Amino acid sequence: ANLSRDYQSASDRYFEALVRSPGDDDLADAAITAALDSGDANRAHQIARMARRDSSSAYVHLVRAVEAMSAQRWTEAHAETTRVEGGGSEQLLGHMIATWARTGDGHVDEVAPELQQLSTVRPYGSLFGFEQAMAYDFAGRNTDALTAYAAAEQGGLWLPAGIERHADLLARTRARADAETLLRNGQNATNPTLSAALARLNAGSTPIVRPLTPQIGAAVGMYGLAAIYIQESDAPSGLAALTLALMLDPQFDAARIAFADAQGRIGHGDASRAALRQISDASPYAETARVMTAWSLLDDDRNDEALAAAQANASQGGVRSKRALADMYRRLQRYSDAEPLYSELITADADDWRLYFSRGVARERLNRWPDAEADFQHALQLSPDQADVLNYLGYMWVDRGEHMQEGLAMIQRAVEINPTSGAVIDSLAWAYFKMGDLNQAVEYSERAVQLDAADATLNDHLGDIYWRLNRHTEARFQWQRALALGPDDAAAVQAKIDHGLAPAPRAAHR
């Protein structure tokens, strides 16, 4: 179960084994790790109490440290972190808890210089910069905290929980205009946590967030580490860190959203939806949770339930919910339902290139090419270097035999921007194929299939190119692969397997 990332089942079985052999340290480690990865905080606490005092399990000591932190037993929490032995991820989690145990115990002058040194170490530096700022903030050293917050925000890690604390301190130190600017800046304006903070600021509230505690500071640190672990494809460490964050701060819905997203990405929709159900309707993340639940159902092929949920969400009037419903219609190839929704969204926000691109796709599939073409071009006017738009419009032009050189240049630019996308490289191969340059076409088509071997269209295109190169056996092999992968037009692929391609038309002028 653990190897298949079914962490709840693994937790159940490890725990049952541990009950039968409570002194087995290896079982304790496996059980507590699986419990944390499944989000089962109660079981993790239970295992930490069952395990030997001198357990070699890093997570046993981390959970015990969290328990001590929750009870404000700072010295005990710090002592538990000194017993953490394991990989780098566990060591960093222990260091984060130790930082806040010592801060809670009044040792910010010792902690802050250590965090300052760590703030230059990538990829964690910006996170430790935020932690230094929050430690100063907790200690009431406002000038130092403001300087550290500003430096952390330049470090490359977007941490809404840290930005929220920065805005709160600005508001408390009578820099409300600066706080408002920060909360409205760039992607900050679209984050539920920061939007809620801005609403409280505009309502005249000060402070605009809950008072900072060592438990909250440590939870933010765990959340930041989890984001880095997950980005580095270490989902188990990320999930464990998120569960520890929620044990420290049960109101931390951003961590709950991240946990649900990580479970969904590894294919465990039930675990994802269970986490999302814990988010209340009063949370800033309530709409996000509802949207994610609908997408999770769709990912599990529960299409009717997914659409019903998405339609119910959209009926409440939220922009994010309407966008999700439109995207869901598009994914289900219900383009006539998606197109008017995108038009409605564009009326409300005429500056979002994504909406024009999405509507353009729907219109192209509805055979409204002039309207689609206009949408793609408008999307590029708003954001010229979007690989998806460049690729789509360039491919359509080349495939239709229009603006061939301009289309080729667009696709080449898309490849520069996204050189590891099989779909984009396939478009380049197809452009060369349509223009009669079979040597270039086969080179890029083979590369595209290597990058995305499970894509029916890419395999179909490679078959076409092989056929034109008189490599007929290989062509039929690729078409057979495409057919097995579920192409949009299976009958057309089968016809090529049976009869090959019709004689080639004259190549377009280059």
Image (spheres, rainbow, N blue to C red):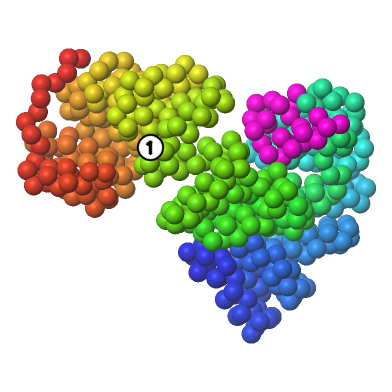
Residue type at mark 1: give it.
Tyr
In the depicted structure, whether residue 241 falls above or below residue 186 = below
Q: Residues within 10 Å of mark 1 (few under 14, many from 20)?
A: many
Place residue 127 in its image quadrant. Answer: top right
In the rendered image, the quadrant that contains the C terminus is top left
Name the foreground residue: 326 vs 268: 326
Place residue 83 in its image quadrant. Answer: bottom right
Whether the magenta-drawn stretch holds residue 190 is answered as yes
For disc 1, the marked residue is 335
Name the foreground residue: 60 vs 315: 315
Q: Is residue 505 visible?
A: yes
Q: Is residue 415 left or right of residue 114?
A: left
In the depicted structure, whether residue 349 falls above or below residue 77 = above
User: Residue 11: where, in percent of width, then height?
Assistant: 60, 70
Q: Is residue 225 left or right of residue 466?
A: right
Name the foreground residue: 250 vs 274: 274
Q: Which residue is painted at 86% across and 31% down in the image?
A: 204
Q: Which stretch did the figure color magenta?
A: 181-204
User: Residue 145: where, in percent of width, then height?
Assistant: 85, 33
